[in-house]
């Protein structure tokens, strides 16, 4: 599975960090707490990533799997690794996804493909 | 192109999304996280202390830190992002008021506090107030 491969890759990065840094690095893996909301137009995924800045957050979509990762150095040589993945419905337009990070909260907006949105059809008099 | 959707088709669509939510639930049981996501760190030394608190999503205007002698109090409010038109598929984050108090082993004065709030993390450095040492009292005599 692609997820497993990705996880192994990030483990390697951690061990490299451990070797290059003089101070010991303690890696904490955290599954960020998440809210998911849906309305007619989109699905919003909101994740807590306290301490993270834009350059530390990585959002990717591959084979319908949405993956969120962030590596955040903390006090006393701690490295926080936030990681969470979701299966995304095909009716969502991942190419139009928007990601905003504000005060340690990441908000992902996934709009539905136009064809997937419910529509009201205007009835015209003949 | 205009598409007509029957109520049945709409139901299937919702079910499809429910399935996504179930997958997310299944994902919780994976032993991925090894620490609590909402964490506070407190490090106290002889003459200084460091308090670190995760308050993601809190607006600085909704954050109140107060110090009285050896008691440090932190109050914060987090706004609910759920809008009325939204259906909730998953809700793990907490909202509303939050309060936490720390009693320090020594008193701190105003000059000894340094608080910063960056990327949703509150970091407070506290310096022990210089203690009033033994004073010599001049004894008056006639």
Image: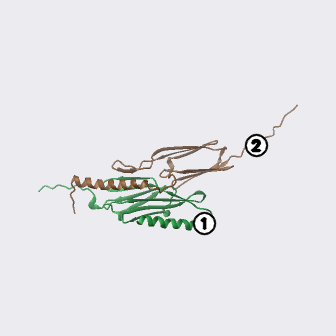
Chain colours: A green, B brown
Q: Residue at x 58, y 65 (%)?
A: A18
Q: Which mark is residue B133?
A: 2
Q: Quadrant of the C terminus of chain B?
A: top right
Q: Quadrant of the N terminus of chain B?
A: bottom left
Residue B114 position (above or below residue A91): above
Q: Position of residue B79 (x, y in %)?
A: 44, 48
Asked if residue B75 lies left or right of residue B95, the reply is right
Asked if residue B105 lies left or right of residue B10, the reply is right
Q: Which mark is residue B102?
A: none
For the residue pair A119 and A45, the one nearer the viewer reads as A45
Instruction: State which chain disc 1 sits on.
Output: A
Give the residue furthest to the left.
A126
Q: Which mark is residue A21?
A: 1
Q: Nearer the viewer, mark 2 or mark 1?
A: 1
Q: Secondary structure at mark 1?
A: loop
Q: Residue at x 76, y 43 (%)?
A: B133
Asked if residue B93 lies left or right of residue B12, the reply is right
């Amino acid at each position: 599975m692609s997820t497993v491969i990705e996880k192994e890759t990030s483990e390697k990065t951690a061990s490299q960090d451990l070797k290059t840094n003089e101070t010991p690095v303690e890696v904490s893996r955290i599954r960020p707490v998440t809210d998911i909301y849906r309305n007619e137009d989109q699905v919003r995924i909101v994740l807590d990533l306290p301490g993270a800045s834009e350059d530390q957050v990585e959002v990717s979509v591959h084979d319908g799997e949405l993956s969120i990762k962030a590596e955040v150095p903390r006090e006393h040589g701690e490295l926080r690794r936030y990681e969470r993945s979701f299966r995304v419905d095909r009716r969502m337009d991942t190419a139009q996804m928007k990601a905003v990070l504000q005060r340690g909260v990441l908000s992902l907006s996934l709009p539905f493909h136009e064809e997937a949105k419910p529509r009201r059809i205007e009835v015209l008099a003949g | 192109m205009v598409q007509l959707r029957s109520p049945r088709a709409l139901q299937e669509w919702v079910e499809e999304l429910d399935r996504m939510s179930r997958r997310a639930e299944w994902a919780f049981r994976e032993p991925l996280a090894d620490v609590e996501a909402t964490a506070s760190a407190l490090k106290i030394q002889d003459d200084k202390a460091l308090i670190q608190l995760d308050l993601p999503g809190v607006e600085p205007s909704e954050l109140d830190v107060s110090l009285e002698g050896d008691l440090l109090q932190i109050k914060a409010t987090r706004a609910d992002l759920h809008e009325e038109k939204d259906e909730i598929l998953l809700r793990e984050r907490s909202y509303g008021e939050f309060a936490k108090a720390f009693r320090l082993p020594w008193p701190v004065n105003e000059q000894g506090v340094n608080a910063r709030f960056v990327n949703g993390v509150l970091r407070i450095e506290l310096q022990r107030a210089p203690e009033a040492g033994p004073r010599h009292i001049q004894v008056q005599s006639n």
